[in-house]
Image (cartoon, rainbow, N blue to C red):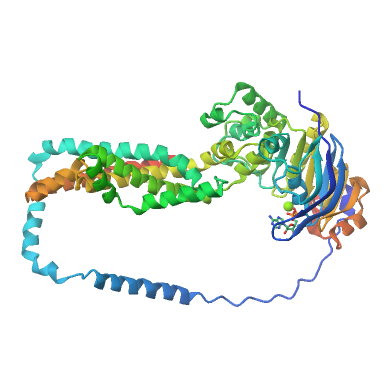
Amino acid sequence: MTPAGAGICFDGVGVTYPNGVVGLRDVSLDIEPGEMVVVVGLSGAGKSTLVRSINSLVPFTSGEITVGDVAVSGLRGKALRRLRSEIGMVFQSFNLARRTTVLNNVLMGRLYAAPTWRTMLGLWPASDVELAMQSLERVEIVQKAYANASELSGGQQQRVAIARTLAQQPRVILADEPVASLDPPTSHVVMRDLQRINAELGITVVVNLHFLDLARRYGNRLIGLRAGEVVYDGPGADADEKVFESIYGRSLTAEDVLDTPARLT
Amino acid sequence: MSAAVSMSKPTEHPPPAQQRPVRPRTWWKAAAVLVVVAAVTVWSAIAVEVDFGALFRNAGNASRTIGQLLQPDYSYFPETVRPLLETLETAVISTAVAAVLSLPISFLASRATDPSTPLLVAVRFVMNVIRSIPDLLYASLFVTAVATGALSGILALVLFNIGILVKLVSEALDGLDRGGQEAALAAGSGWIKADRSAMLPEISPIYISQTIYVLELNIRASTVIGLVGAGGLGMLIDKVRTFYQYHYLSLVILEILVLVVVLEFVSSYARRKLVR
Ligand SMILES: Nc1ncnc2c1ncn2[C@@H]1O[C@H](COP(=O)(O)OP(=O)(O)O)[C@@H](O)[C@H]1O
Ligand SMILES: [Mg+2]
């Protein structure tokens, strides 16, 4: 029943923040429906700006972004909310409401479709609850459905956040450094969840990552950003040390990898 | 995997030369505030012409009054039951009505939950006006405009409470973590639905706790506003005081004391249970 993934097209996109800082500079990209793309770059390179412009959390100031067959520029009100309802978003800091249940958090993925009066009374349709439960099952955390979000570990919270996007039945999932607050083993669990969702449901996935070993491992396609510009676009497996040094604009350090050699031996 | 490991050889950089910052000097700010506060206090005392001598000149009078106050007349108790209940009812009803009205207004008065600047400014302006009028003034206004008795007391307390509750709750909303709300908005929710599902659960312990605090305030306040004719124990106090019946007065004061202490216990217990 889930609609197939949507393609994302950047056509000469630029983002200049109100304070004059340039976030993106003339970015042109074609992301195919059902593709999984990893975006890497130093802190401040424009990774967040890139993914946030796709659902217009950050408005772009030039060019055009097309999601599926919808042009994003100029969308407002209901039309913008409709687009956002088809794009799930996963955040570095999980962004759960901590004092309510896991189930209620996942149901927030249904807010676009839910009538206001039902939301006010907290009366969710049984079909939405069922969808939320299935989403929790897909990330294998359904047993926590009635626990408070604050009782969960970081990795569990991030999987709940992924379930929340699944409850949207999205065509695209955007993940902005989803593992930056997690330890290495948990990072792999979350990345594998995203990979599986991409493969099984055909949802287009765009993930920002900071660590180059994660990026190579999970990025079928890797996009390197530097100072708001695309400086690499190709298979993750082809990205060697030289490529990363050109993306980062400096030689590599221990901070650039998640799994240090000591951990792996 | 092995490729990633081989290319991840850490390159050590020597730490850059560091310079410790000079500790900023801030004591003079504290000193300046202290001087201003002291000056304002002294100036206020002079301006309102505090006459400490009166304390001693009227000492004889006071000791007689205190003597009577120390011997409450318990036989008067039956007469106080009705006003006592009226005070309690006034406090409870006002708290309930104000709590219901304050919740949506608080969401409109916080920048974290209200995206419309004109609406925000308008709501905050009205709330500032409401809060600038003291409860006693509300009470006397309603006693004049409506009638003597409990209804005026309730109306006065409701306005007084809305002023307090909206201020406390909307400021708490400003300080909340907005992650859940951001996620809801990113998923295509409108603001009302996002606020309801992501912000209300986060604010509710604070809201409940402040509502209990307001109930406590109301027990005290409902006796005071009774003095201007808004019903309850306050009206009784006014009556016995006018006739210098200090034995009765001390019983009423004792009852208020018991009421406040009991409520204090109940509310701190409830708060501990509700707010974890
Ligand atoms: N809201 C904002 N206002 C102004 N400048 C911003 C804002 N958000 C990000 N920037 C700037 O835009 C650039 C790109 O930031 P960002 O997209 O957050 O990078 P990344 O996610 O790769 O760390 C940085 O220089 C950052 O300081
Ligand atoms: Mg970022």
In the image, taking residue A164 as reference, residue A222 lies left or right, namely right
What residue occupies the far front of the structure in this picture?
A: B145
A141 and A163: which is toward the camera: A163
Examine the rendered structure and indicate whether residue B158 appears above or below residue A239: above
Does residue B74 appear to the left or right of A80 in the view shown? left
**Left or right: B170, with B53 as reference point:** right
In the image, what residue occupies the spot 7% across and 51% down?
Answer: B244
Q: Position of residue A65 (x, y in %)?
A: 80, 43
Q: Looking at the rendering, which quadrant does residue B143 occupy? A: top left
Could you tell me which residue is drawn at 22 percent across and 37 percent down? B86
Looking at the rendering, in which quadrant would you find the N terminus of chain A? top right
- Look at the image and tell me whether residue B264 can be seen: no
- Number of disc labels: 0
Q: Quadrant of residue B35?
A: bottom left
Q: Residue at x 15, y 43 (%)?
A: B236
Kindly tell me whether residue A149 is visible in this rendering.
yes
Residue B140 horizontal/vertical position (percent): 24, 47
* Residue B110 percent across, percent down from the top left: 51, 48
Residue B133 percent coordinates (x, y): 33, 52
